[in-house]
Image: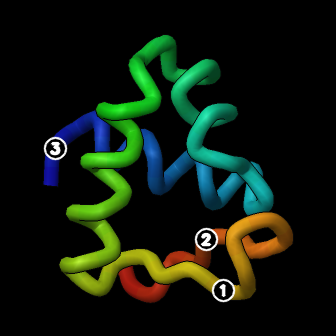
């Protein structure tokens, strides 16, 4: 896991309803970078999505 992915996890811990655009802005990185890291974290089973696209949120499964 990269330091950036670790920072995303910490951000999700502190701001559970954060969206990918909000994470990108908070970390001063591109949306695409956040999306790629979130996909990696999701495929690794570290995070998962709960709910739909609009009203859903990211859940930290294991860390």
Distance of label 1 from label 3 (alpha carbons): 24 Å
Circle number at residue 58: 2
In the rendered image, residue 51, in percent from the top left (x then y), is placed at 73, 86
In the rendered image, residue 11, in percent from the top left (x then y), is placed at 59, 45
Distance of label 1 from label 2 (alpha carbons): 6 Å
For residue 19, above or below residue 31: below
In the rendered image, residue 26, in percent from the top left (x then y), is placed at 62, 22
Say which element carries label 2: strand
Residue 26 vs residue 20, the one in the foreground: 20
In the rendered image, residue 53, in percent from the top left (x then y), is placed at 69, 70
Q: Quadrant of residue 30?
A: top left
Q: Residue at x 39, y 39 (%)?
A: 34
Q: Quadrant of residue 4?
A: top left
Q: Residues within 10 Å of mark 2 (few under 14, many from 20)?
A: many
Q: Is residue 21 left or right of residue 33?
A: right
Reading the image, the residue beneath label 3 is 2
Residue placed furthest toward the right? 55
Circle number at residue 50: 1
Q: Residues within 10 Å of mark 1 (few under 14, many from 20)?
A: few
Q: Are marks 1 and 2 in contact (CB under 8 Å)?
A: yes
Say which element carries label 1: strand
Q: Answer with mark 2 or mark 3, whichever residue precedes in sequence.
A: 3
Q: Is residue 60 left or right of residue 42?
A: right
Question: Marks 2 and 3: which is nearer the front?
Answer: 2
For residue 49, above or below residue 14: below
Q: Quadrant of the C terminus?
A: bottom left
Residue 39 vs residue 1, the one in the foreground: 39
């Amino acid at each position: 896991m990269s330091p950036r992915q670790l920072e995303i996890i910490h951000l999700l811990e502190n701001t559970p309803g954060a969206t990918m655009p909000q994470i990108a802005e908070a970390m001063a990185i591109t949306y695409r970078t956040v999306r790629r890291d979130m996909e990696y974290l999701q495929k690794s089973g570290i995070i998962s999505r709960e709910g739909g696209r609009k009203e859903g949120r990211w859940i930290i499964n294991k860390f």
